[in-house]
Amino acid sequence: MAKKKVHATAGTPATTLLEKEKVAYTVHVYAHDPAAASFGLEAAQALGVPAKRVFKTLLVATGQPGAAALAVGIVPVDKTLDLKAIATALGIKKVEMADPAVAERRTGYVVGGISPLGQRQPSRTILDTSALSHETIFISGGHRGLDIELAASDLQRLTNALIAHIAAH
């Protein structure tokens, strides 16, 4: 995969991090439909790739204090996040989905465009095992209508992600 520069108007903290770390990636821009029911499935369809290769970034509230109060789960857009499984991977009993406003403040991104990369305040991250079965995966690039294609191993390294089965059908 060839590295592709982002147009100045599309630069995000995620692409800045990838450039700084000299990671090979490709930017994919598509026309976002504000009426789309699922941002992730919209991306898969617009980009013409299987939904199992497009991953969404979800934040969960852990009930723990301080920086550990939130964690990130990254799962395919055609699956849901298994809350019990991510809690187990984090070594705690229970999590719940984070309030969207809290997720936006913590990451610096808007819901539907939250990237696991370049977050304002990084959180513990769990990447679903299915990501490793693909040569490259797609993640949000930092705003709606912008996805980044990169190797799952690079995403794991840059986010210091644990790998676990956290996706449910």
Image (tube, grey):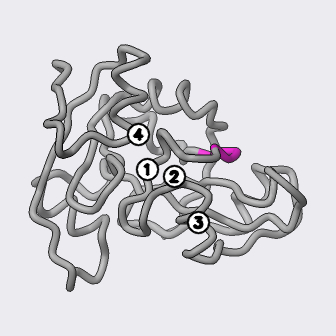
Q: Are marks 1 and 4 in contact (CB under 8 Å)?
A: yes
| The residue positioned farthest toward the front in the image shown | 8
Work out how far the residue at label 1 is from the one at label 4, CA to CA, in angstroms.
9 Å
Label 4, on which residue? Answer: 13
- Sooner in the amino-acid sequence: mark 4 or mark 2: 4
- The one nearer the camera, 47 or 119, is 119
Disc 1 marks which amino acid? Ser
Residue placed under numbered mark 3 in the picture: 103
Residue that badge 2 annotates: 74
The image shows residue 81, relative to residue 141, as above or below, that is below
Which numbered mark, 2 or 1, is in the foreground of this view?
1
Q: Amino acid at mark 3?
A: Ala
Task: Specify few, some or many for label 4: CA neighbours under 10 Å numbering under 14, 14-19, or 20 or more.
Answer: some
Majority secondary structure of magenta residues: strand
Q: Position of residue 157 (x, y in %)?
A: 55, 24
Task: Tell me the crowding category of disc 2: few under 14, some 14 to 19, or many 20 or more residues within 10 angstroms, Cα based.
Answer: many
Label 2 secondary element: strand
Dot 4: element: helix
Q: Earlier in the sequence, mark 2 or mark 3?
A: 2
Residue 115: assigned label? 1
Is the C-beta separation of discs 2 and 3 under 8 Å? no
Figure label count: 4
Q: Is residue 95 above or below residue 1?
A: below
Q: Which residues are magenta?
A: 122-126
| Mark 4 residue type | Pro
Separation (CA) of disc 2 from disc 3: 14 Å
Of the 4 image quadrants, the one containing the N terminus is: top left
Using the image, determine if residue 167 lies above or below residue 28.
Answer: below
